[in-house]
Amino acid sequence: MAKKGPRILVNLECSECKSQNYITEKNRTNTQDKLELKKFCKNCRKQTIHKEVKK
């Protein structure tokens, strides 16, 4: 059965190499803008900014 509520799954994409490395969820009511997190990219082998893309 599907979850009820404002939380949705989003993919995080590396801003340099454009690979989708992470899947996380966010609360749509609290954060309307797109997520931007500094995460480790295994392809670039360094910490880069990962931005939210549609799943």
Image (tube, helix red, strand yellow):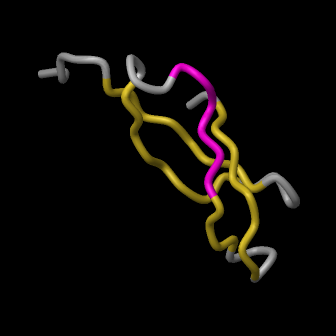
Q: Looking at the magenta stretch, what is its main secondary structure?
A: loop
Most extreme residue toward the front, as rendered?
A: 30
Q: Is 5 included in the stretch rendered in magenta?
A: no
| x then y, percent, for residue 8 | 38, 27
Residue 34's quadrant in the figure? top right
> Does 35 appear in magenta?
yes
* Residue under the image location 48 percent in, 26 percent down: 31
Q: Quadrant of the N terminus?
A: top left
- The boundaries of the magenta stretch are 32-37
Residue at figure coordinates x 56%, y 31% from the top left: 55
Q: Residue at x 19, y 21 (%)?
A: 2
Q: Is residue 31 above or below residue 22?
A: above
Decide if residue 11 is on the left or right side of residue 53: left
Residue 11: image location, x then y, percent: 56, 42
Residue 24 drawn at (x, y percent): 43, 46
Instruction: State the residue in front, 35 or 54.
Output: 35
| Residue depicted at x 69% and y 53% | 50
Question: Which quarter of the figure has residue 44?
Answer: bottom right
